[in-house]
Structure formats: structure tokens, C-alpha cells
Image (spheres, rainbow, N blue to C red):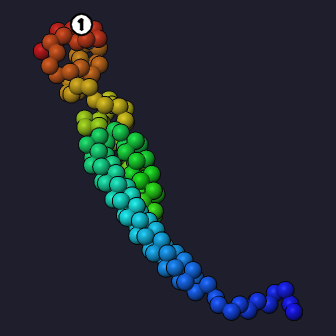
Amino acid sequence: MYYNQQVQVQEKPTAAYYMSLIGGIIGLFIGIILLFIIIGIWFIIASIMVLVGAQKLMQEPMEHTKWGVIILVFSILGGGTILIGLIGGILALVYKPIPVGTAQPGQPYAPYGQPLQQPITRICTQCGRVVNENVKFCPHCGKQLP
Ligand SMILES: [Zn+2]
């Protein structure tokens, strides 16, 4: 007689086997269903966060790093299903906001990237500096302006 050989019994534990089998299969199904529900809910949450991030990005372009990270993180946490969101997040991070009124390269008297405080339209006749068109006296030299 070999030890590995199955020992024959008069009556196999059929009832115990089937009950355990059915119980196990039902448990497996419930687990799979719950898993899908949890994954589904999580995907919805992650997707909403990506949408919120995208919306906030438009509202607060200066905060593009914060919202870009949120879009990026929730796109990744969405299980890679929001790949386009991932690209959106990266684009949000590399985005460079230029405030309205900022001079573009080539425009005189305003270095690139610095917001233009006031409209520059004329030059003082005495000191030659650029002054606001609304001022009556030159803020640099005090000369009365026409
Ligand atoms: Zn002046």
C-alpha cells in the first residue's frame, strides 16, 4: 500500500462536500459583486474628483499645480481607466498662467512675466521716464505734464 494512494471509504462525505461547495461558490459570487460595487463607487468618486479638478482649474488657473495634482492623482487612483484625465493633469501641471494685462515679449517697458500695473502711454518730457497717462505730475521728477 502506498501512502499517496487515496484510501477508499464505504461512504464519501457527499453532503458535506456539496454544502461546502455551494457555500463557497455563493460566497465567491457575493465577494465579486461587492468588489464590483466598491470598484464602481470608487471609479465614480475618482471621476467626480477629476471633473471637479478640471472645473477648478478653469476657475483658478493660478492654482494649476494644486488642481493638476488632484486630476493626476485621481486619474491614477481611478485604476488607469481615466487615462485622458491623466494627460489632462500633466497638461495642467506644465501649464504656465499669464495674467491678463501682462506684457508679452517684444512689448516695451514691461518685462515678460510681470503684470502690467498701469497703462503706459507716454514719456515724461523732462526726465524721459515712462509715466501713466492719467497723472498730472511726473512721479519721478515732479514735472507738470500737459
Ligand atoms: Zn519726469
Q: Is residue 92 visible?
A: yes
Between 136 and 79, which is closer to the camera in this rendering? 79
Residue visible at 45% across and 56% down?
Answer: 77
> Quadrant where the N terminus lies?
bottom right
User: Along the horizontal axis of the image, is 11 left or right of 117?
Assistant: right
Q: What residue type is labelled 1?
A: Gly
Q: Where is 2 relative to 84, above or below?
A: below
Q: Is mark 1 within 8 Å of ligand 1?
A: yes
Taking the view exactly as shown, the residue that stands out farthest to the right is 1
Residue visible at 44% across and 65% down?
Answer: 35
Quadrant in which residue 143 is drawn: top left
Residue visible at 35% across and 55% down?
Answer: 45
Q: Where is 45 relative to 11, above or below?
A: above
The spot of residue 40 in percent (x, y) is 37, 64
Residue visible at 15% across and 12% down?
Answer: 136
User: Along the horizontal axis of the image, is 11 left or right of 30?
Assistant: right
Label 1 sits on residue: 142
The spot of residue 3 in percent (x, y) is 84, 86
SS for tag 1?
loop
